[in-house]
Image: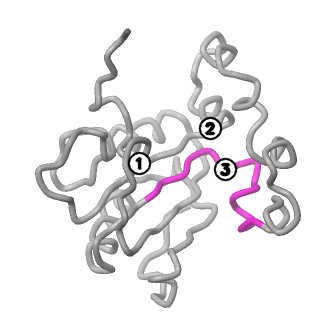
Amino acid sequence: MVAVELADVQGFILRGYTMPVSRYFGLSVRESTGTRAFLTTLVGNDPTVPSITTAQPWAMKPEYCVNLGITFRGLAALEVPQASLASFPVEYREGAVARAATVGDVGTSAPDQWLPWLADPGLHLLLLLSAQSSAALDSATKPPQQASSPSVAALGRHDAPSCAGHAPRFAWPG
């Protein structure tokens, strides 16, 4: 059996954060080199930019957690080599919208009921932020927004119901 390095697994895969507030950004790759540089900030060691939260055990629950989803089209937009793209299962290559009925996303759960940007074929990245408080959420949101570039365009944003009453305090560039 191969041991899984917890530092190589995103935290939300193995644990529920149970944090009271969350914010989600749908992003589109406009230019691959700049977007890869932006993504590097999320896995770097810069203490001023929130890093992707791994599955490594916590000594203390953090104030916020950051996770990232990348669609198959996002990998292609990031110029992942064709041989690597071909290695992914057909289910991932087809995407959530095309597979919605197969997985039971019908009726009120169908793609035409989703936030429009979640069904947009240009959705390449989903940045997920979870936090212990609205202040921590706002604090965690600013550095990725500042580290982004015109290479990354925002398609949409969604705040979890517990912080949905907050007006956006910035506009993502793009």
Q: Looking at the rendering, in which quadrant would you find the N terminus?
A: top left
Three-letter code for the amino acid on which mark 2 is drawn: Gly
Q: Are marks 3 and 2 in contact (CB under 8 Å)?
A: yes
Going from N to C along the chain, the mark reached first, 1 or 2, is: 1
> Which of the 4 image quadrants contains residue 86?
top right
**Residue located at (44% from left, 52% from top):** 149
Inter-mark Cα distance, 1 to 2: 20 Å
Identify which residue, 149 or 56, lies in the foreground: 56
Q: Residue at x 35, y 44 (%)?
A: 11
Describe the colour scheme in one phrase. Answer: one colour
Q: CA distance from mark 3 to mark 1?
A: 20 Å
**Rendered residue at 32%/56% (across/down):** 65
Decide which of tag 3 and tag 1 comes sooner along the chain: 1
Residue 43 drawn above or below residue 97: above
Label 1 neighbour load within 10 Å: few <14, some 14-19, many 20+: some
Residue 125 image position (x, y, % from top left): 56, 47
Nearer the viewer's eye, disc 1 or disc 2?
1
Q: Is residue 10 left or right of residue 171?
A: left
Dot 3 corresponds to which residue? 123
**Dot 2 corresponds to which residue?**
74
55 to the left or right of 69: left
The kind of secondary structure element at disc 2 is helix
- The percent coordinates of residue 39 (x first, y second) are 40, 41
Q: Does residue 65 sit above or below 141 in this rendering?
A: above
Nearer the N terminus, badge 3 or badge 2? Answer: 2
123 vs 114: above or below? above
| Residue neighbourhood size for the residue with mark 2, other residues' Cα within 10 Å, grouped as few (<14), some (14–19), many (≥20) | many
Magenta residue span: 114-128
Residue tagged by mark 1?
A: 12
Q: CA distance from mark 3 to mark 2?
A: 7 Å
